[in-house]
């Protein structure tokens, strides 16, 4: 029986994928769960296993082709004994090898034309754009990847060699000539990840009635706790104790108290989610990812620390699985790590709320005591809550962010672990 292999769905809002590399060709035998091809999307590259064993009879898409989700890309005959491979445009039928011709003088191979269509990954294109590498210069780089593809390492090596050449090049003699500006407009096409982010953000603004509120949070006791216990935590766990797990922990408790903020809307229907699945915005080299920590209400504080660390590391090293980028019920964007005081992030659809986390800075503040008011130095952080006014009113948003604030300021730090 011949079965179809289709372009898989790699996550929410992803409607197409790019064929990066076929690991098998027409006529090859393949086992169940053996890797058939590699696919690239706006968010992640993934190796795709075959759902069936048999012989590959057709391959219907070439490397670099962009294919819609659900479209047939290959066919496998599961009856291996009766399978007859069908030639395809990707893997031509082998021809009988001709007799070798008489020896002739060796001639150097002609260089590959710089105008030949080549595929570059979003990471390579992003680095090239930042470093001012033109298309002609990029095409001249010898790639070490599959089928001569230029990898990130190839481009970085080229940039190092170019910089070294510029350093050792002798300076030209000084000539007094009028300075003429060489600045010109540059037109650069967005890569796939940037296009996906742009479309998703525009959709969110067109869908939700955005409202934002901002509160001050006194993080002094958490900062002091992390300073004292951070070294022992790192020695035990192998990574640093950051402020993000404290914020997630406080947010999860607030979401349990305010279920509307942990919901989604379908038309006029409110869907209250049974689990709290936190999406954490992670800045990566080519853009932004929002991996999800599922069922946060079932995790203790140490479990959250480990999950936050694991997702951040795997997102930045391109090891996140496609299914880990969907299913969030609420999102957190920590722009404080870039020394930003506060911001108003866009809601991550289909969520109805997103928490923005600013940097922590020491400030002089008024402290109320039984003996009267005094001025003290405290570690202050700004939190912002963005919510969909179609479902959550101003009062509900204010109560939610106040709950997160109180959870942080009154957290029982002595019994966290």
Image (spheres, grey):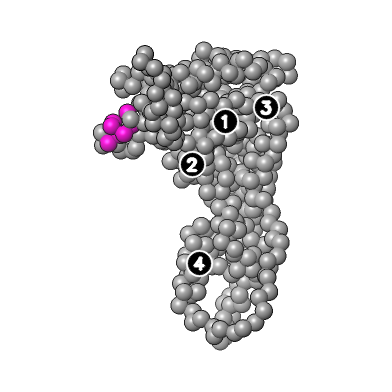
Residue at mark 4 to residue at mark 2: CA–CA distance: 32 Å
- Mark number, residue 184: none
Q: Residue 407 at what x, y percent from top left?
A: 44, 19
Q: Is residue 265 magenta?
A: no
Mark 3 or mark 4, which is nearer the start of the sequence?
Answer: 4
Q: Is residue 230 magenta?
A: yes
Of badges 2 and 3, nearer the viewer stands 2
Q: Residue furthest front?
A: 372
At a point 49% along the width and 20% down the height, the residue shown is 404
- Mark number, residue 158: 4
Residue 33 seen by the camera: no
40 vs 207, nearest the viewer: 207
> Which residue bears the numbered disc 3?
210
At a point 56% along the width and 48% down the height, the residue shown is 286
Q: Secondary structure at mark 2?
A: loop
- Quarter where residue 244 is shown: top left
Q: Which residues are magenta?
A: 225-231
Of badges 4 and 2, nearer the viewer stands 2
Q: Secondary structure at mark 3?
A: strand
> Which residue bears the numbered disc 2?
339
- Mark number, residue 326: 1
294 vs 219, nearest the viewer: 219
At a point 55% along the width and 57% down the height, the residue shown is 127
């Amino acid at each position: 029986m011949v079965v179809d292999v289709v372009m898989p769905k790699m996550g929410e809002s992803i409607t197409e994928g790019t064929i990066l590399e076929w690991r098998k060709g027409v006529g090859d035998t393949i086992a169940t769960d053996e890797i058939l091809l590699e696919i690239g999307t706006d968010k992640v590259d993934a190796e795709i296993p075959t759902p069936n064993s048999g012989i590959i009879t057709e391959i219907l898409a070439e490397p670099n082709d962009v294919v819609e989700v659900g479209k047939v890309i290959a066919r496998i005959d599961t009856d291996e004994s009766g399978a007859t491979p069908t030639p395809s445009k990707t893997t031509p039928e082998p021809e009988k090898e001709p007799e070798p011709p008489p020896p002739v003088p060796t001639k150097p191979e002609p260089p590959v034309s710089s105008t030949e269509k080549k595929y570059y990954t979003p990471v390579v294109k992003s680095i090239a754009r930042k470093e001012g590498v033109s298309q002609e210069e990029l095409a001249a780089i010898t790639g070490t990847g599959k089928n001569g593809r230029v990898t990130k390492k190839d481009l970085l090596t080229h940039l190092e060699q170019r910089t070294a050449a510029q350093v050792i090049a002798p300076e030209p003699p000084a000539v007094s000539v009028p300075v003429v500006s060489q600045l010109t407009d540059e037109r650069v096409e967005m890569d796939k990840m940037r296009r996906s982010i742009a479309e998703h953000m525009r959709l969110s603004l067109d869908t939700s009635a955005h409202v934002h509120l901002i509160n001050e949070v006194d993080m002094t006791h958490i900062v002091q706790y992390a300073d004292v216990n951070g070294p022992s935590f790192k020695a035990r766990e192998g990574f640093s104790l950051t402020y993000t797990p404290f914020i997630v922990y406080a947010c999860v408790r607030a979401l349990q108290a305010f279920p509307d903020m942990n919901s989604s809307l379908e038309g006029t229907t409110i869907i209250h989610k049974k689990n709290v699945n936190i999406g954490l915005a992670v800045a990566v080299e080519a853009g932004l990812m929002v991996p999800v920590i599922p069922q946060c209400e079932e995790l203790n504080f140490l479990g959250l620390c480990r999950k936050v660390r694991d997702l951040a590391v795997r997102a930045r090293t391109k090891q996140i699985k496609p299914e880990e980028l969907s299913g969030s019920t609420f999102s957190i964007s920590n722009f404080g790590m870039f020394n930003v005081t506060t911001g108003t992030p866009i809601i991550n659809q289909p969520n109805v709320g997103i928490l923005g986390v600013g940097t922590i800075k020491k400030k002089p503040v008024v402290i109320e005591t039984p003996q009267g008011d005094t001025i003290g130095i405290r570690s202050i952080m700004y939190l912002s809550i963005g919510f969909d006014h179609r479902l959550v009113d101003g009062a509900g948003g204010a109560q939610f962010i106040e709950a997160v604030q109180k959870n942080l300021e009154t957290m029982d730090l002595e019994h966290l672990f």
